[in-house]
Image: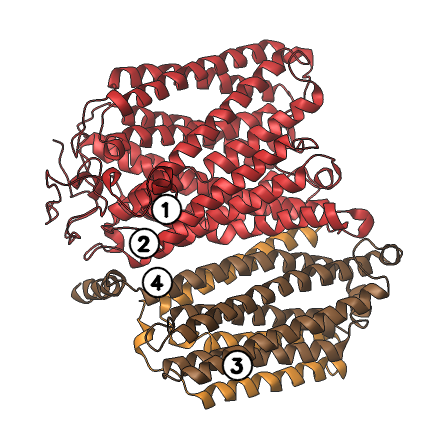
Chain colours: A orange, B red, C brown
Amino acid sequence: MDRDTSREPTAGYVHYALIWAALVALLVMTIAVARLSLLANYSVLASLFIATVKAGLVLIYFMHLKHEGWVVKGMLLLAVAALFFIIALTFVDVWYR
Amino acid sequence: MNECTMDNKSPEASSFYDEKGKYSGVLAWLMSTDHKRIGLMYLGALLSFFSVGVTLGVLIRLSLIAPGVILNAQQYNEVFTVHGIIQIFLFIIPGIPVSFGNFFLPIMIGARDVAFPRLNRLTLWLYLAGAAIVMLSLFIKGAPPDTGWTFYAPYSIQTKANVSLAVLGVFVLGFSSIFTGLNFVTTIHRMRAPGMKWFRLPLFVWTLYATGWVQILATPVLAITLVFIVLGRVFGVGFFDPSKGGDPILYEHLFWAYSHPAVYIMVLPAMGIISEIMPTFSRRNIFGYKAIVFSALAIASVGYFVWGHHMFTSGMSDTARIVFSFITFLVAVPSGVKVFNWVATLYKGSIEVDSPLLFALSFIFLFSIGGLTGLIVGSLAPNLHVHGTYFIVAHFHYVMFGGVGFSFLAGLHYWFPKMFGRMFSEKVAKIGWFFFFIGFNVLYFSMFILGYQGMPRRYFEPPPQYHGWSVVSTVGSWLLAVGLIIIFSNLIRALFKGPKASSNPWGGGTLEWSIPSPPPAENFIEIPVVESGPYGHGKRE
Amino acid sequence: MEKESNAGAAVTAEAQSGIDYTGKKIGMWLFLFTELLFFGGMFLLYSVFRSQYPAEFHSAAQEENLLLGSVNTTILLTSSFTIAVAIAAIRKGNKILSLYLQTATIMFGICFLIIKYFEWSAKISKGIYPDSPALLSRGKGDILFFSLYYVMTGIHGIHVLIGVIAIAIMFVYTRRGVIDRDNFAKLENTGLYWHFVDIVWIYLFPLFYLIT
């Protein structure tokens, strides 16, 4: 259910700094993968995968999704699913013309 | 059924009309954050724009039986475009949520107001601003839009008409819709009275919840699509222009990805009203409460993925056409469940055919015709023949006008005594209904025949073989107009001269019938503690 | 049964007590979903056009300035860090630190926009902008890539600007004490908005600079 997270203690400064460091490391990784053409044809997929990991870190730690109840998490899932299916159904047209 | 534990009917209580705030006169209304005042202002604006839209509709019908006499071809295109824009964006999409939703949602869940009252007031201002911008596009230099309300590329990018301005107006209106949905979803999650569990919510509230989600998740897609139109017109960005690598079918995908869910924004609250009226006038519980709840949620979710059925003749892939047609058939199922449950509610009920029920029964009949013809047009093969014909025009007017329109009137009659503290003439209401109902069917059933015979839509000068039924249809529009005049005259008269209404003239069971008519400013003297199901809060007086 | 109605009572107690922190937060998340779908329409176009012109998108991306793009990404990631810590600071009662961090976030946002300005100017001076003769003379894939570039980074940039203004307003509220350790919903919601803008860029960066 919805929890009143304003009553719960906040994460510490070091905690946030660690997440920031991870984000920068992932940024370096994603540039390396693309520039070095390490994975050739899969580099786009790899870049997007790493982007999703970064987005996940921002969502879970900076946006406090980790502390939220199922209401907020469920709503987010709904919104992302909606976008995914709109794009997917459009591709059912575009790919099969 | 347990009674609600609080008696909220103190005879000395003044109503929300008497409330004195920081402002006086018109500002006391425009600056108010009271959901009831906001709902009423919306109601007045909606019905005003609706009247303009109806007038344009009557004009279209006149032109069709005598092309060139009152409108030339260019003007005809502008008139049907503006008719669509006004009826859809200024009346029916905001429609039930902003009027009855605003007024009754907090009361039905036992709250004093919505979650974000100032945001609510902002949505009203955005609505008025958006409407003003759209009106501006009709009258300033240049021409009113002539693209159809669907603004299809490439014509919408190329036409000299005031499309950018009109589209900006719709963009602003979209924000009003988004914030309304956001407000309602949050309100329902957070502001329910103690004991008002999810499955004790009135069905109207459930439909406002489902609708709120569609408003949140679908409207932004329209917003970005409108931005693309303006970018195309002003900066030459060619996402829909094949010479620049673009694709006009992508415009249709983006446009209908909103505009199909939009019809569920229209119809879900309308169904919610019917779900409220049926038990009250059958004097028994609604049949299959949970089934109706899940049907509403199913319609909202599945309805999100059927938009391609507006595009069967566009050049979309065969695979996509099959997929969209299939999903379209799926979405008909929950609607069927609802119709069945409403009719089953009547069974062994103690039925009083007062005007709200008359309009509600009409909804069931007319929406069923619209829905069944929806299956016809949702099938690929027939669609190829009827797309772009009057068959489609008839189909959507049956569901939107016969459906949502009649439900709006049902709700208006049902909740009129509660909102205004006065009662209207039942007899005149029924006379008005009669003309309206007959007129409606003459007007639109003729269109099924015309469409089946191949009469194209949006044509200024239809080929002569369609003249006969066109005349019949136009006569129907006059009967319909007479009916509407009678209905609204009755209600307007009642506003000033109607007898005072009691708190529960119909015997409704939801929380709004347990408070005075009209309600006090803070809705409840004490927030009720809910111990019963949704329909245990009232008896007829 | 009992637990369920207690949970319901707890929800409404917080909500009816006057300041519904959780309600405000839910409202903000719902607004972010509308932004997700708004940008989603642009990502839809990007993915369709990229699937139709993969090679052209690859080569066009090489014309982007990877250094500036990477710097901008670092700036936004760091600004997400500063706003997150600004919120943690005010919740710990550390008003001064929060004000410094909010200012830092604003500065980062402005830097991002300045760098964007230089990137756009460089392209425009080369004659590459929507509907320019130079652009129209190139292949359709190029036209689409650069049109998408301007539209997507442009609309994203507008959102960065809105975020900067919002944080500036929060700065004033924090200074005045309207935002403090017990009333920080406004700041946290502004932070949510800022993080969303950061996440959009996290995706824009590889799509325009790294698909080489």
Q: CA distance from mark 4 to mark 2?
A: 10 Å
Instruction: Identify the image quadrant of the N terminus of chain C.
Output: bottom left
Query: Counting other residues with Cα less than 10 Å from the Cα at mark 1, is it few (<14), some (14-19), or many (20 or more)?
Result: many
Q: Quadrant of residue B79?
A: top right
Q: Establish whether labels 4 and 3 are both on one chain.
A: yes
> Which chain is mark 3 on?
C
Q: CA distance from mark 4 to mark 3?
A: 25 Å
Q: What residue did someone put label 3 on?
A: C81
Query: Total marks drawn?
Result: 4
Q: Contact (CB < 8 A) between labels 2 and 1? A: yes
Between B110 and C108, the one nearer to me in the picture:
C108
Q: How far across and how far down the image is residue B8, in percent?
A: 13, 44
Residue A57 seen in the figure: no
- In this picture, residue C37 sits left or right of residue B429: right
- In this picture, residue C51 sits left or right of residue C24: right
Query: Counting other residues with Cα less than 10 Å from the Cα at mark 4, is it few (<14), some (14-19), or many (20 or more)?
Result: many
Q: What residue did someone put label 2 on?
A: B188
First along the sequence among labels 2 and 1: 2
Q: Of discs 3 and 2, which sits in the foreground?
A: 3
Q: Quadrant of residue C143?
A: bottom right
Q: Of discs 4 and 2, which sits in the foreground?
A: 4
Give the residue type that dot 2 points to: Ile
Q: Establish whether labels 4 and 2 are both on one chain.
A: no
Q: CA distance from mark 1 to mark 3?
A: 38 Å
Q: What residue did someone put label 1 on?
A: B208
Q: CA distance from mark 2 to mark 1?
A: 9 Å
First along the sequence among labels 4 and 3: 4
> Which chain is mark 1 on?
B
Q: Contact (CB < 8 A) between labels 3 and 2? A: no
Q: What residue did someone put label 4 on?
A: C23
